[in-house]
Image (cartoon, grey):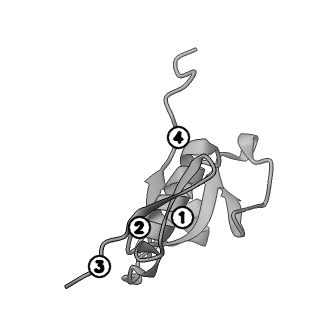
Amino acid sequence: MESVASPVRVGNVHSYDGARNNMKKNGEKLVIVGDGETAQLAHEYFTLDSPYEVVAFSVEQTFLKQTEQEGLPVVPFEGVENVYDPTDFRIFVAVSSTKLNR
């Protein structure tokens, strides 16, 4: 019988007892578009609870403030396909709808 991960409360954050951290990766590599809170949450979910391997973050050049996040490179969105070939990498857009159309 397969064990089920039980949540463990650590301060104000819920964590899992490790069972999910061992999810087998399927070899598909993922670039997360965004570098804010939504992107950080996406990184955590994809890292701990998905078969994808997150390899980088990407933001528009105008908003590029750092070259690394969570130990991964942050690359300009303009030209991301030149660095991460779309035939080999998936993209997940992790931006919120805050302040759109203003």
Q: Quadrant of the N terminus?
A: bottom left
Amino acid type indicated by mark 1 = Glu
As helix, strand or loop, the secondary structure at mark 1 comes to: helix
Residue 83, relative to residue 15: is it above or below?
Answer: below
Q: Nearer the viewer, residue 43 or 100?
A: 43
Foreground disc of the pair 3, 1: 3
Side (left or right) of 91 relative to 56? left
Q: Nearer the viewer, residue 83 or 67?
A: 67
Q: Which residue is mark 1?
A: 81
Foreground disc of the pair 3, 2: 3
Side (left or right) of 22 relative to 55? left
Side (left or right) of 12 relative to 63? left
Residue drawn at (45%, 55%) of the image: 92
Q: Residues within 10 Å of mark 3 (few under 14, many from 20)?
A: few
Circles 3 and 2 in contact, beta carbons < 8 Å: no
Amino acid type indicated by mark 2 = Asp
Amino acid type indicated by mark 4 = Val
As helix, strand or loop, the secondary structure at mark 4 comes to: loop
Distance from the alpha carbon under mark 4 to that under mark 2: 20 Å
Circles 4 and 2 in contact, beta carbons < 8 Å: no
Residue 87, relative to residue 94: is it above or below?
Answer: below
Q: Which residue is mark 3?
A: 3
Residue drawn at (60%, 46%) of the image: 12
Residue drawn at (50%, 47%) of the image: 94
Of marks 4 and 1, which one's residue comes earlier in the chain?
1
Residue drawn at (44%, 81%) of the image: 22
* Quadrant hosting residue 99: top right
Of marks 3 and 1, which one's residue comes earlier in the chain?
3
Q: Which residue is mark 4?
A: 95
